[in-house]
Each structure stands twice: as structure tokens, then as C-alpha cells.
Image (tube, helix red, strand yellow):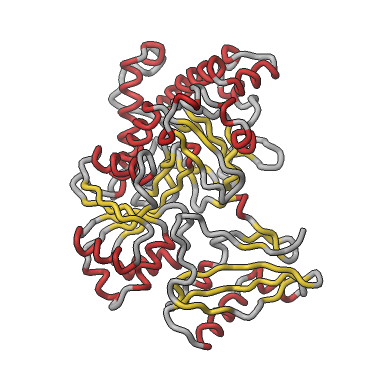
Amino acid sequence: METCYVETWLHNKVRQTAIDCPELGSGDGFKDLSHISRSHIEAFQFFRLKRVLDYAFQKSKYYKEMFCKIGITPDDIRSMDDFVKLPFTEPDNLANIPHKFACVSLKEFAQEYLLDTSGTEGKPKRVVCTQHDIDQMIDFMSAGMRTVSKSSDTIMLILPDGRPNSQSDLLTKGVLKMGGIPVTCDISVSPDECIQAIEKHRPRVIFTSPSRIHRITMGYKPRSRLRELGVQTLFLTSEHVSSTMRKKLKEIWNCEIHGHYGMTEMGLGVSVECHAHDGYHFNEADLLLEVIDPNTGKLIDDDSEGELVFTTLIREGTPLIRYKTHDISRVIRQPCPCGAATLKRIGSPVRKMRSFVTIGNNDTVYPSFFDDEIYSIPEVVDYQAVISNKENTDCIKFVVETTEEGLGIEKEIKERLLKNPVIDSNIDCGMLSLAEFELVSMGTLRSKSRAKKLIIDNRKR
Ligand SMILES: [Zn+2]
């Protein structure tokens, strides 16, 4: 198995920084850089952390006020134990007062340097990126792409628009940087047009969302021909890939599936699933990760689940300190089976707290919660869960898009859903009911944007 390229990339960053910055390079253990250990990486991160704290204190109104409020300066942060006493940054603060976070004047930057979140989960947020920030983002995207592909590969990006500094534009530059051949295909084109583009360019890697590639796959006939197109890797972003969908796509395309977890505020590309398929290696040159108990804010030291909290280490435009992502996962500290022994990993799946919905007897469900049951039906293209409430009983209605209609499908989906323990137990105790399924034809649930799939909650609060 090939060792994750992100490790080589990170080791080179540590070496170069030690050479360029004597404050780091003269430290204990930095004389011999032939072998980079976890302690080198942590010393490098703490060096960058000290710099970003100083920088944010000098340039960001928000962080200046934060330090003044707690009565310390960045000089007082001498260890990670000191650092974790700093307050968290709440996403809503960033959403409400982005100009106070920015270390540069937002007015001086053209629109293409302002990255906005879609707002599908919480209030829309804006961060500003300098050209240095953009270059660093491209650099990591290049390393992430290199992890799942070879340097001469043709890589097709099926993403929304390619305006300057969009994800599609930055990834295109990242692919070029690693020596690959980028081909873009706008997300708004039809599945047929996508397949025509794949037939024409014969990419070895396709980067898109799971629901998009699933829709393209289901719309093509004969499906057995897809494995002849030579696609070796589906690199899937923006939504969790359920194990059922993963298995289905892997079999149909006869290729490897890699997941990706990213976030606009953290520089779009955050992490990549390596060939070991056991969690995500992330950009440890720019991101310091903590996992906390979302209720108490206390650090979680073992590998248990909690909320991911990031600090950006080299961002110039909008650095973020202890930023609460509202995403739930765990950190894996053991060496990865791919051979990367010095990297941490983010566990899979990463679940988004803002998309959690409580049903029945206080059970939590989220957009991919029903994927395994519903996508295991071969005719299903996509689905939408809609929750309502009648006389204190929650009711879930599934709108299911299929390639063919038929009563058989409805019955089969229902049988599988009833085996889901949350559905089963809540129906048993009278807290939940399933409405009649609505089967809709191909294309009905298709969305032209990349808005993430959400559960529609129509209950009155
Ligand atoms: Zn790995």
C-alpha cells in the first residue's frame, strides 16, 4: 500500500521551516532532519501557533479584544496547556462580525478573495484570503490529490462554476501543480453530458459529490459499461459516503473510493482519505486540531467522539483561533495502516451537528442516517426525508427518486427501514410513524447547486 503523500509533504514543510527559521531549527532534536518524528511536527506546529497568536493579537480587532478581556498577551502562552485555556471562537461570531476577525481590510480585496459558506448549516460566514492564503490552499490541495492519484493522471472535477478562487478553480491549480491534467465539468450539466465528457477525456480520477456521481451512475445504461471507462478513483466530497453507496459505486465503476472532508473557513480542502480507508489525513501544516466535549468544552484526550475545533496556523486574511466547527468526529493517533506513522487522522464519518434532527423519543438522525437502508435498493437514485408532527407523534415521509416505479420498491424500502433500530423502537412506543412513500421519477430531486442534503423538518416549534 502506498504511504499517504500528505506525510511526505508535511515532513518537507517541517524541514524547510526549520532551515528558514533558526528559532525552530536551533531547537532540541532539529539538528538531524533525516527522520521527522511526531515531536518534530508538534514543535513545528507550536512554533507556527505562537506566530499566529502574535499576528492575530496585532491585526485582528476580535482577537485583540479577546486577549484584553482575559488579561493576557500571546507572550503568556508558553505551552499547549496555556493555549487550551483560550476561549473558543463561535461560528456565529464570525458570521456576525467578519470584519473584526479579518487581519486585512475586507474592502481592499476583490470578491474572488472573499470565501463565503453556503449557509446550509448555520448562518453564512465569510473569510478573506490573501494571495498567500490562496497559494497555501492550492499547495495542500495538490498534496491531497497526489495522495489519491499519480502525477500524470487526468483528473475530472465535477463541481459548481469555475469562477476565480472557487473550489473548482483552486483544485484545477492544485492538479496542475502536482503534474496532473485537470478537466472540469460544471455540476449543472446533465448526467448524459457528464458521461460524454468522461468518454472523451478518460479521466483516471473523478472528484465530485457522492450524490452527483450516484445520479450519473444510475442514469447511464447499460451500467455495466461504466467499468470500461478506465476510472480508477472516485474522490468524493461534501457529503458522507455511506457504506452501501461506497460498495455500490465501487462495484459498478470497478474503482477505489476515497472520501474528502473540507470546510470553507478552514481553507476548503481540509483532509483526504488515504489508501487504508480508515479516516482522513488532514492539513497539519495549517490546522491544529482539538476534540472537545460540545457540552462542557473540555478536551477529549482519548479517541472518543467530540466536536472538532481548529486553529489556523498560517492564515493571513482571517486566522481563526480555537474555532468550533460544530462537526462531530474523533481523532485517531495510532499510526495509519498506509504506513504514515507521524500523522493524526480525523475519524470517519464526520457528522454535522447543525444538520442533526431529533425525532421520536429524543433520538438523533442526520442526512445520511437512512442511506444504508434506502440506497441498498438498486433502483433508488436519491431520496429526501421530510418530518412533520401530528398529535405528538413524529411522522417521516420519504420522497424517493427511482429509475423505475413500482409497488415492489415501496414495500422493500419500508421493510428495510423498519429494521433500522431507531425507527423500529420509536414506532413500537408510538412516538413515530412512517407516511406513505412518494416515488418520483428520475431527475425530480436533482439540485443544480452543491447544497448539501438536509432533512426537511416541518414541525412547528
Ligand atoms: Zn493513511
Is residue 316 found left or right of 361 in the rendered image? Answer: left
| Residue 70 point in image, percent of width and height | 69, 19
For this view, does 264 lie left or right of residue 16?
Answer: right
Residue at coordinates 73% horizontally, 66% vertically from top-left? 360
Q: Quadrant of ligand 1?
A: top left
User: As displayed, is residue 203 above or below residue 60?
Assistant: below
Residue visible at 61% across and 13% down in the picture: 73
Residue at 44% x, 37% y: name it: 267
Total labels drawn: 0
Closest to the observer, 35 or 441? 441
Q: What is the quadrant of residue 83 in the picture? A: top right
Left or right, 31 with reference to 246: left
Residue sitting nearer the eye, 123 or 1 = 123
Figure quadrant of residue 7:
top left
Which residue is more in the foreground, 21 or 25? 21
| Residue 253 vertical placement versus 79 (above, below) | below
Q: Quadrant of the C terminus?
A: bottom right
Q: Position of residue 150 (x, y in %)?
A: 22, 47
Spot occupied by residue 431 in the image (x, y as percentages of width and height):
76, 71
Using the rendered image of the protein, determine whether residue 300 is visible from the camera's viewpoint.
no
- Looking at the image, residue 267 lies above or below residue 257: above
Please indicate, yes or no, whether residue 56 appears anywhere in the rendered image. yes
Q: Quadrant of residue 144?
A: top left
Give the answer, above or below, for where 249 lies relative to 40: below
> Measured from the top left, where is residue 154 in percent x and y?
22, 51
| Residue positioned most to the right | 391
